[in-house]
Amino acid sequence: MKKIELICPAGNLPSLKTAIDSGADVVYTGFNDATNARNFEGLNFTEQELADGISYAHKKGKQVYLAINTFPQNDTYPQWYASVDKAVALGADAIILANLGILKYARDKYPDINIHLSVQASASNYESINFYKRHFGIKRVVLPRVLTVDEMKALRENTDVELEVFALGGLCINIEGRCYLSSFVTGASTNTEGACSPSRFVRFINEKDRLKITLNNVVLNDLAAGETSPYPTCCKGRYLTEDDRYFYSFEEPESLNVIEIIPQLIDAGIDALKIEGRQRTKAYVGTVTSILRKAVDSYYENPSVYKTDEELIARVNATFEGTKPTLGCYLEK
């Protein structure tokens, strides 16, 4: 029986090594520029760092996938082309792409490389997925976090493209690849610049016993002593209502945890579970990777009696930025 693949995040070389050593089958990352959708200051890989990371993974019998999944504007596309060239030259095991032009460039120039369709492409139906396979030969699609398990199963019945889903970490409700909230407030879009709510626009302002968090001078949260907040993004902002209450207008800051439904995801034909969090610490990567590895392995040891380990779930939940865990849309919308 082919086991479901465990895909883990790395924003730097120490995190990559930790993920591999903690049980990841694959680590995914990106270059330290606007060609990937986690382009935060001090994050991601230089060419030399990526070469070192790929070498480390391959020596351990593991793989590295590289995200080049943002959208070039006007005449900036040569930078994305160059990133594809570098990824191939360095020996990345798969390149995760979203933009049609970059997909065409990669497939035309490198007919034999392994291309995955990024979640940023927002392909959530089998006609779309099969279109990308027909024209660009994609091997796998990373599904947006908007589908139920039953819908995933229906996809599996209508495409032979591998299916990868998010399992742990931040929950994006805004149909990845189609959200413009950050662009609306800051002028910097995740899809073009690679960072949602770039840190240069974020301010933490102490006012007596309260902490005000702003994004480009727009207040996203006002915290009393003892209150916490995830990284400030527009969708998880708590905004002032007409009756002077702060309210999570889009969504409460929840985090995804699918450990309890691993059997249903495997039964639906999912090929890979992905952990969100390239922007998180090495400690986070090590903790969530080892826990999800243990959960997946326990399923394969005896699928018929898989039991949710409440201690494992609690340990994962303790790492989350969100205020509580959720299954998102996976069981119902």
Image (spheres, helix red, strand yellow):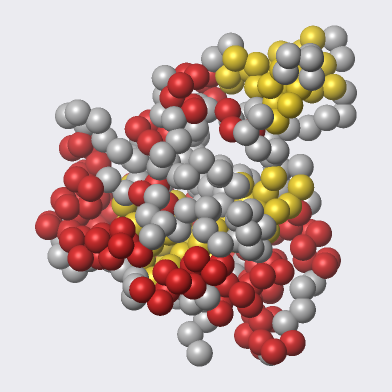
Residue drawn at 54 percent across, 69 percent down: 150
Query: Could you tell me residue 44's position as x and y percent?
Result: 45, 43
The total of numbered circles placed on residues is 0
Observer able to see residue 50: no
Instruction: Tell me: residue 308, above or below residue 35.
Output: below
- Name the one closer to the observer, 47 or 267: 267
Residue drawn at 15 percent across, 65 percent down: 111
Residue drawn at 65 percent across, 16 percent down: 219
Quadrant of the image containing the C terminus:
bottom right
Would residue 82 appear left or right of 285 to someone viewing this image?
A: left
Question: Given the current orientation, which residue lies at the most extreme left position?
Answer: 108
Residue drawn at 26 percent across, 60 percent down: 132
Would residue 257 appear left or right of 56 to someone viewing this image?
A: right
- Name the one closer to the observer, 332 or 46: 332
- Name the one closer to the observer, 11 or 274: 274
Observer able to see residue 232: yes
- Name the one closer to the observer, 82 or 74: 74
Query: Could you tell me residue 70's position as x and y percent?
Result: 34, 41
Query: Could you tell me residue 280's position as x and y percent?
Result: 61, 45
Residue 307: image quadrant is bottom right
Query: Could you tell me residue 82's position as x and y percent?
Result: 21, 44
Residue 156: image quadrant is bottom left
